[in-house]
Amino acid sequence: MTVQHDELIQKIRDIKGLNDKPSQFVIPIRTSEGIQIGVLRPIDESLSKLPEVVEKLTQWRRMFMQYFLTQFSASEARTATWLEKVVIPSDDRILFLIYDDGSRLVGNFGVCDMKPHEAELDNLIRGEKVSDPMFMYFTEIALLSWLYFGVGVNSVVLHVFSDNVRTINLHSRAGFSERQRFDLSRIQEGEDIRYLVNSTKGEPVDFQYIEMAIDRSHFALSNPWAKSLYSDQWP
């Protein structure tokens, strides 16, 4: 199955409830034994206006700001504007909220630059403690399963700082491998910091920007249980 560009935009808009009908879409998070331990729920307009959602996203961004290319003083007003102006209307981006099996909001996980053949994972944060030490691994497998078996992309990429070892290990466990590395430089603009990729501007830093990737066949080989659990989940 390979989705066409117009079909993909329609699917994204449906999932975010932008086509005059509310979305009930969720991705179940399951263990390798098939036990559901949570869900991924896309942020739509109504969720984006919930005080708890805006507060948590802002709090988590502050907690993990050092792992973003752009670093600034996060505020709830800025988060709300980002959701309203960027996340919700975008035709190639979905930001999912992560809930555990007790319906507790524990993190977020994004997909951006979605194309018929490829998508990029971004904005992965676990902001609250969870009981299962493999919870985020199963969360990543659930999202990848939807991209491969529900959307029909052929490959998924992501980018991560080379000093973010825990996240690199998580992605490696899911089957990602390093594709290339880019040098980074740092620019200070008032209180804000920007990291530039392969640029002659700014001050060089001692870590790099890693691009990791996994294609559909390698994902199936690395996580054979996922296909049996998820391949019939979506039409």
Image (spheres, helix red, strand yellow):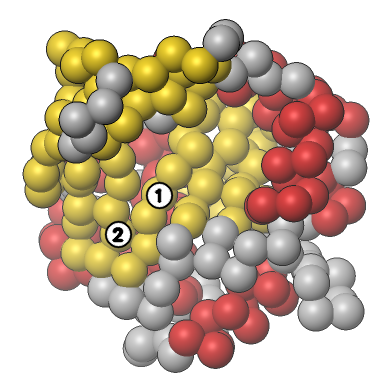
Residue 133 in view in this figure: no
Residue at x 22% of width, y 34% of height: 199
Apparent side of residue 87 relative to residue 93 in the rendered image (left or right): right
Q: Is residue 74 above or below residue 141?
A: above
Residues 132 and 214: in front is 214
Q: Is residue 133 shown above or below 18? A: above
Asked if one can make out residue 199 in the rendered structure from this viewpoint, the answer is: yes
Name the residue located 44 percent from the left edge and 61 percent from the top edge: 113
The disc at residue 156 is 2
Residue 56 coordinates in the image, percent (x, y): 73, 24
Q: Residue flagged by tag 1: what amino acid is it?
A: Leu
Which residue position holds label 1? Answer: 121
- Alpha-carbon distance for marks 1 and 2? 7 Å
Residue 13: image location, x then y, percent:
69, 73
Residue 49 in the figure: left or right of residue 207: right
The disc placed on residue 162 is none
Residue 14, relative to residue 192: is it above or below? below
Q: Which numbered disc, 1 or 2, marks the residue that appears first in the sequence?
A: 1
Give SS at disc 2.
strand
Find residue 182 and report its image quarter: top left
Lateral position of residue 189 relative to residue 14, left or right: left
Category of crowding for the residue at label 1, using alpha-carbon neighbours closer than 10 angstroms: few (below 14), some (14–19), many (at least 20)? many
**In this rendering, would 137 be left or right of 232?**
left
The residue at the point 32 percent across, 76 percent down is: 117
Q: Position of residue 167 (x, y in %)?
A: 31, 27
Q: Amino acid at mark 2?
A: Val
- Mark 1–mark 2 CB contact (< 8 Å): yes
If the image is split into quadrants, where does the N terminus sit? bottom left
Q: Secondary structure at mark 1?
A: strand
- Taking the spot 20% from the left edge, 43% from the top edge, the residue there is 211
